[in-house]
Image: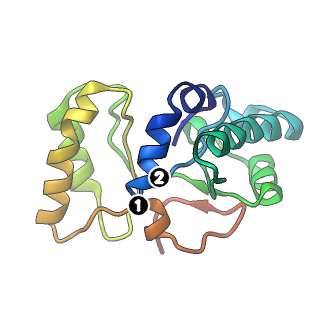
Amino acid sequence: MVIAPSAEQHPELLKRMKAEGHTIGNHTKSHRQLNTLPYDQVSQEIDAGNAAIKKATGQSTRWVRPPYGATNPTVDQVTRDKGVSQALWDVDTVDWKDRNSEHVCSSAVQGARAGSIVLMHDIHPTTVDAADCVIDGLRAKGLEPVSLDRLLRTPVPGKRYYARG
């Protein structure tokens, strides 16, 4: 999930992510708490994120992750109208608060089950450092990390997804 300024500043990274089969999703224009905004402002936040992703990759995204997980019926309606689904999570590593790679890894691995969506932020070096541990730990549990597009192949626009199933 990428905010518009990051997509605009690093289009080469988004192109690489797309080429490697990663899901690229919209994290809005400015990371505002969408559930506090009226319809038109939510719409603008999502439109700006979608435009930046499309400019960088040549394709639109099917996914929006509301910043902070802050969603409500207005966000549901805007995403439905825009034809995108909301990617939330059922496992929060709390990596934004506890900058400890071991904790991030154990939170992700212990909390995950088949179909889970794990929340992690690549803006924190400790989270990036935990990635190999998370992947290895999930595989040791018999789980295979996959992209969001592979996990949820036909998402319903406007629907909130916390996990598959």
Res 71 → quadrant? top right
Residue at (53% x, 37% y) in the render? 2
Please determine whether, in this image, residue 16 is positioned above or below residue 148.
Answer: above
Q: Position of residue 47 (x, y in %)?
A: 77, 41
Q: Position of residue 51 (x, y in %)?
A: 72, 40
Q: Position of residue 105 (x, y in %)?
A: 19, 43
Please determine whether, in this image, residue 33 is positioned above or below residue 156.
Answer: above
Read off the residue under disc 1.
147
**Count of numbered tags:** 2
* 104 sits left or right of 118 in the view: left
Is residue 163 visible in the rendered image? The answer is yes
Towards the viewer: 158 or 4: 4
| Secondary structure under the numbered disc 2 in the rendered image | helix
Three-letter amino acid code at the position of disc 1: Ser
Residue at (64% x, 53% y) in the render? 59
Instruction: For label 1, count other residues whose C-alpha is less than 10 Å away and answer few (under 14), some (14-19) or many (20+).
Output: some
Residue at (53% x, 52% y) in the render? 88
State the CA–CA distance, disc 2 to disc 1: 11 Å
Question: Foreground mark, 2 or 1?
Answer: 2
Towards the viewer: 21 or 34: 21
Instruction: For label 2, count other residues whose C-alpha is less than 10 Å away and answer few (under 14), some (14-19) or many (20+).
Output: some
Three-letter amino acid code at the position of disc 2: Lys
Res 80 → quadrant? bottom right
Res. 18 mark: 2
Q: Position of residue 23 (x, y in %)?
A: 48, 55
The residue most toward the right is 40
| Secondary structure under the numbered disc 1 in the rendered image | loop
Is residue 98 visible in the rendered image? The answer is no
Mark toward the start of the polypeptide (2 vs 1): 2
